[in-house]
Amino acid sequence: MAGGTTARERLLDELSSVSRRYMASYALFNQAVADHLGLHPTDLQCLNLLTLEGAPVTTGRIAELTGLTTGSATRLVDRLEKAGYVVRERDAGDRRKVLVATVPEKIAEFGRMWERLGGGWSTLFDGLDDRQLAVIVGHMRRTVEFSGAQVARLRAGEV
């Protein structure tokens, strides 16, 4: 399109703006949930990641998941333990290893709160067919991978 922008360029510009608003709204939502639970926003996201892991993990793994140093990850675990969301336990296979495990009752309470907040979430997708949902899922996966790579670049001082 001579002298103007193409439809794709306009869509990409809009996607950029909408993405920025989405990220800001999610950060503010995350902060509000963390405040409600008496947690730091990073602690809340760590708790989220721990529930996705499906098994107890080491503090080193928490550092990997969050991009924190091992010292910062240890302090994060200290805060989650003090709040009652996790416990430290010895690894049955290697007693020298300490694992961080979520506390089922607290995770259930956490889950109930998410259900109350996200009760209408799935209805956002009612008008979409399976192909459209697959596009969104693919986009979210690529975004997670892209964000992880960007975090690594920032932490490495490449930016």
Image (cartoon, rainbow, N blue to C red):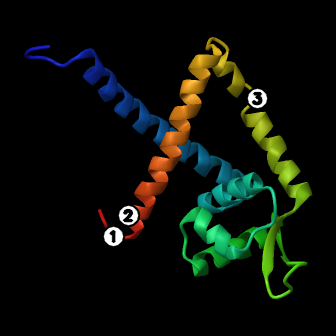
- In terms of secondary structure, where does tag 3 sit? loop
Q: 7 left or right of 119?
A: left
- What is the distance, in whole Å, between disc 3 and disc 1 at their CAs? 40 Å
Q: Is residue 144 above or below residue 131?
A: below
Q: Which residue is mark 3?
A: 119
Indicate the position of residue 135 as horizontal and vertical percent values: 54, 25
- Nearest to the eye among marks 3 and 1: give it: 1
Please name the residue shown 91% across and 78% down the image.
92
The amino acid on which the numbered mark 3 sits, given as a three-letter code, is Gly
- Is residue 141 rendered to the left or right of residue 55? left
Circle 2: residue type = Leu
Residue type, label 1? Gly
Please tell me which of labels 3 and 1 falls first in the chain.
3
Q: Give the vertical position of 27 relative to 95 (above or below).
A: above
Dividing the picture into quadrants, the one containing residue 140 is: top right
Q: Residue, x 66% and y 69% (percent of image)?
A: 61
Question: Dot 3 surroundings within 10 Å: few (below 14), some, or many (20 or more)?
Answer: few
Q: Is the residue under label 3 in contact with that under label 2 (CB below 8 Å)?
A: no
As measured in the structure, the alpha-carbon distance from the residue carrying label 2 to the one carrying label 3 is 35 Å
Q: Position of residue 84 (x, y in %)?
A: 83, 66
- Residue tagged 1: 157
Q: Position of residue 142 (x, y in %)?
A: 49, 41
The image quarter in which residue 70 lies: bottom right
Q: Which residue is mark 2?
A: 154
Q: Residue furthest bottom?
A: 96
The answer to whether residue 75 is left or right of residue 150 is right
Is label 2 in contact with label 1 (beta carbons under 8 Å)?
Answer: yes
